[in-house]
Image (cartoon, rainbow, N blue to C red):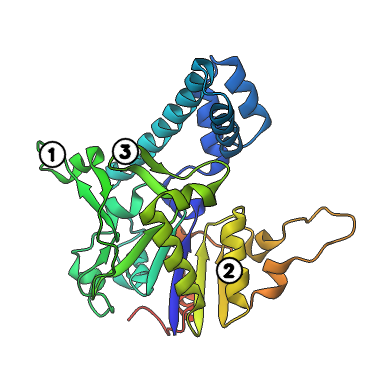
Amino acid sequence: MNRILLLGAGFSRNWGGRLASEVRSDLQTALHGDQYLSRLLQQRDFESVLGMLQGEYDRQPSAENQQRLGAMQSAVSNVFGAMNRSFMARPGMEFGNDIAFSIRKYLTKFDAIFTLNQDLLIEFKHHPNDPGIWQGSAFPHGYQIPGMREIRPPDAPMEIDRIRSMWAPTSDLRLEPNMQPYFKLHGSSQWETAEAMPMLVIGSGKTAAINRLAVLRWYWEQFLRYLSLPDTRLVVIGYGFADEHINQAILDAARGSLSMFVVHPRGRDILVRQRNAMIPPPEPLRDDVPSLGESTRPLSTTFSNDELERDALYRAIGLAGPV
């Protein structure tokens, strides 16, 4: 059995992370003095606005378009910076002290973790060298972010100083034995190329942006490979199914032996893309991807004291419980 986890913004929301609508609100506050950007953010989601600004600058690289794009990118970076600082200040990821309800223990049960999130919650709070969490898993050496290395400032000896770390790509695109791979499909905040360009895939043209970066292109290939493995169980937590390239990859894999369990406040209803249509069209994500079930409860209760719901998440990946 092949167990895969896919995380969206709703996952980090359990620890105070911002959803896309909340990021837009933060950007509206930060950019309220710019009439042009403020009006765009009132009309569209922030990724669409960023995509428009990128397109305008590509077509006409004027000083004005460069200033607008730079202001938007800087504001987005500040939102993620504030989010990361809040994660670093948290005492941990757990919602209680009972190891049987450990969310981090659950994370270790997957053959691979893929995320669309660009925050640093996992990096800061899911420690790869915690033997109590990794004991009994298939990954005694913890997890790795393949093809990336953390660069900590020389004057940053304390764990809290990692807020100033940067991550840079390496030429070593391989999976380490006995380590769980953690793939950030859309890059991350505080990731930079060798030319000090952000490795953050936001806005329109995500597929093209991924293809321009070797490590992200390789991540995408790994995502397709893991999805296509026999008897694959995919657990999706907090993803709103708004990225067509991700959805299509899941649909393609469902023609094989992939099944999916959805953790979202709206449950499997999130798979319905056109719920207000007068004549309901086909809904492939709902109808064509074999279902393992759903959970509509927040992780903060599931992994605090809700034994029935916790066990449901374990059964979704073919396990009886947190052993």
* Mark found first going from the N terminus, 1 or 2: 1
Q: Quadrant of the C terminus?
A: bottom left
Mark 2 burial class by Cα count in 10 Å: few <14, some 14-19, many 20+: many
Judging by the rendered image, the residue that carries numbered circle 1 is 156
Mark 1 burial class by Cα count in 10 Å: few <14, some 14-19, many 20+: few
Judging by the rendered image, the residue that carries numbered circle 3 is 85
Disc 3 on helix, strand or loop?
helix
Disc 2 on helix, strand or loop?
helix
Amino acid type, label 1: Ala
Disc 1 on helix, strand or loop?
loop
Q: Is residue 184 left or right of residue 160?
A: right
Which numbered disc covers residue 126?
none
Residue at x-position 20% and y-position 71%: 141
Residue 52 in the image: x percent, y percent?
Answer: 60, 32
Residue 1 in the image: above or below residue 208: below
Q: Which sits in the foreground, 143 or 322?
A: 143
Judging by the rendered image, the residue that carries numbered circle 2 is 250
Cα–Cα gap, marks 1 and 3: 15 Å
Q: In which quarter of the image is residue 89?
A: top left
Residue at x-position 84% and y-position 54%: 277
* Mark found first going from the N terminus, 2 or 3: 3
Q: State yes or no: discs 2 and 3 in contact (Cβ < 8 Å).
A: no
Residue at x-position 19% and y-position 45%: 151
Q: State yes or no: discs 1 and 2 in contact (Cβ < 8 Å).
A: no
